[in-house]
Image (spheres, grey):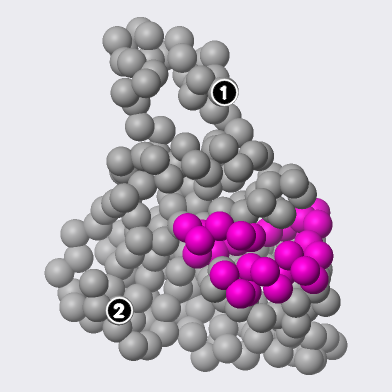
Amino acid sequence: MKIPNGYCDLRVESVNGEIINAFIKHGYALIAINTTVNCSLLSNGGLTKKKRKFTECNDEDDEEKDWVPTPKLINNNDSKLTILNRLTIQISNISQLQKILGSQNFKLYNILAVEPLNDKVFQDIVTSPSIDIITCNIKTSITPKDYTIAVEKNIYFEISYGPMLFNSNTRQDTFTLAHLLYIKGKSKNLIITSGAANKLDIRNPHDVMNLYPLIKNEWPQDTYRLSVFVATMPL
């Protein structure tokens, strides 16, 4: 696949005609539609008790069931916007990553992001050649050494600006995470995504670029710039 030049948003939670049109109007060239799988809900054999009962009632074989869902495919004939499929997996141990990599449906995705659910698995995934993006939260324990290893493996760290639009608490959490990534790795290999679930969550690429100095702690007191970003709504 030929990747177009231009602005991109590598985490969009849902897609429809309105969202696609909003991204095109804002000048984006590429978006990635995200599907999230919480692997901690799978038992060692593959299923929780509740899900196992459901599949038994439907005569499904646990071993044959692919627990990576098919991508959120979208029929888009507009050449102005390239749409990729992204898989985000939440894992508590490295064996869950190996299970996902062996999935047939996994091959249908273009991007793999991993959200580590504990410190041990974070240390394990930074050396994986299969991972494109690591998504963290403020509780994730990151060392400068692990950050450097991830950068050397061409793994990117992610901050989504979507939570900043909800309330002051989630906004502060986002800045706390941004500060953590700056302290541990000088914000190297950092991407900003929207996490957009509807068209009102989408921001103009230039507004997102104006957010970078805030994320990288260059203007920590620039409340005017932040208020403009949060208040801006797409036409």
Label 1, residues with CA under 10 Å away: few <14, some 14-19, many ≥20: few
| Residue 201 seen anywhere in this rendered image of the structure | no
Q: Is 98 on the left-hand or right-hand side of 141?
A: left
Position in image of residue 160 (x %, y %): 60, 67
Q: Position of residue 15 (x, y in %)?
A: 35, 59
Task: Name above or below for residue 19 compared with residue 232.
Answer: above
Q: Is residue 216 above or below residue 78?
A: below
First to last magenta residue range: 126-153
Is residue 71 within the magenta segment?
no
Residue ID for mark 1: 43
Kindly identify the residue that appears in the image at 49 percent across and 85 percent down. Answer: 205
Residue 11, given in percent of the width and then of the height, sits at 48, 64
Q: Earlier in the sequence, mark 2 or mark 1?
A: 2
Direction left: furthest residue: 77
For badge 2, the amino acid type reads Ile
Task: Give 5 or 72, whichever is nearer the viewer.
Answer: 5
Question: x%, y% of residue 45?
Answer: 51, 20
- Name the residue: 81% across, 57% down: 141
Contact, CB < 8 Å: mark 2 with mark 1? no
Local SS, label 2: loop
Q: Quadrant of residue 152?
A: bottom right
Q: Residue 144: say if magenta.
A: yes
* Towards the viewer: 215 or 172: 215
Q: Residues within 10 Å of mark 2 (few under 14, many from 20)?
A: few
Residue 3, numbered circle: 2
Name which quarter of the figure residue 69 lies in.
Answer: top left
In the displayed structure, does residue 190 sit left or right of residue 36? Answer: right
Residue at the (34%, 55%) spot, across then down:
109
